[in-house]
Image (tube, rainbow, N blue to C red):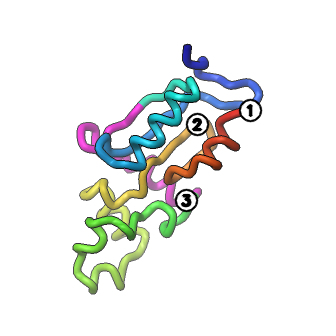
Amino acid sequence: MPLSVFNASKGLQMIKIYGIPNCDSMKKARKWLHDNNLEYEFHDYKKLGVPEKNLKQWLKKAGLDTVLNKRGTTWRKLPEHIKENIDESSAIQLMMDNPSAIKRPVLESGNMLLIGFKEDEYNSHLLD
């Protein structure tokens, strides 16, 4: 049975994970959460869009280089002049228009923010 929405030892609140269902990193993260009996809410960018307020908070907490997915196809297909002149404002618009340009998954729980799936980080931040 999944843990409740609050893990007292870690101070976890409800976990919300943002991404695209077919993404391999998303699949790994969701499997990890399931395997560790952690409940979560999934926010599908394709169906629900990108919450601009959250995106701006992620950029403030983690920085543009962490949030913007420069390894993906969306980034690689951009014209060079856009990539060379990207700033936070233009990056926000890019990510709002193309959610695939956001590194995935993005996991929030209270004030905690994890971007990308690294099993050791999930273990240390989400488990006892």
Q: Which residue is mark 3?
A: 60
Q: Give residue 109's mark.
A: 2
Q: Residue 9 in the image: x percent, y percent?
A: 77, 28
Question: Tag 2 or tag 3, which sits nearer the N-term?
Answer: 3
Q: Main secondary structure of the magenta part?
A: helix
Front one among 3 and 61: 3
User: Where is mark 1, residue-wise?
Assistant: 128
Q: For the point 68% across and 25% down, which residue is it? A: 7
Q: Which residues are magenta?
A: 42-61
Q: Crowding near pointer 1: few (<14 within 10 Å), some, many (20+)?
A: few
**Label 1 element class:** loop
Mark with earlier residue (1, 3): 3
The answer to whether 56 is drawn above or below residue 113 in the figure is below
Q: Is residue 121 left or right of residue 75?
A: right
Q: Are marks 3 and 2 in contact (CB under 8 Å)?
A: no
Looking at the rendered image, the disc whose residue lies closer to the viewer, 3 or 2, is 2
Instruction: Specify the farthest residue to the top.
Output: 1
Given residues 127 and 97, the one toward you in this image is 127
Magenta stretch: includes residue 54: yes
**Mark 1–mark 3 distance (CA, rounded to whole Å):** 28 Å
Q: CA distance from mark 3 to mark 2?
A: 16 Å
Check disc 1 and give the amino acid type: Asp
The answer to whether residue 94 is seen in the rendering is yes
Res. 57 visible in picture:
no
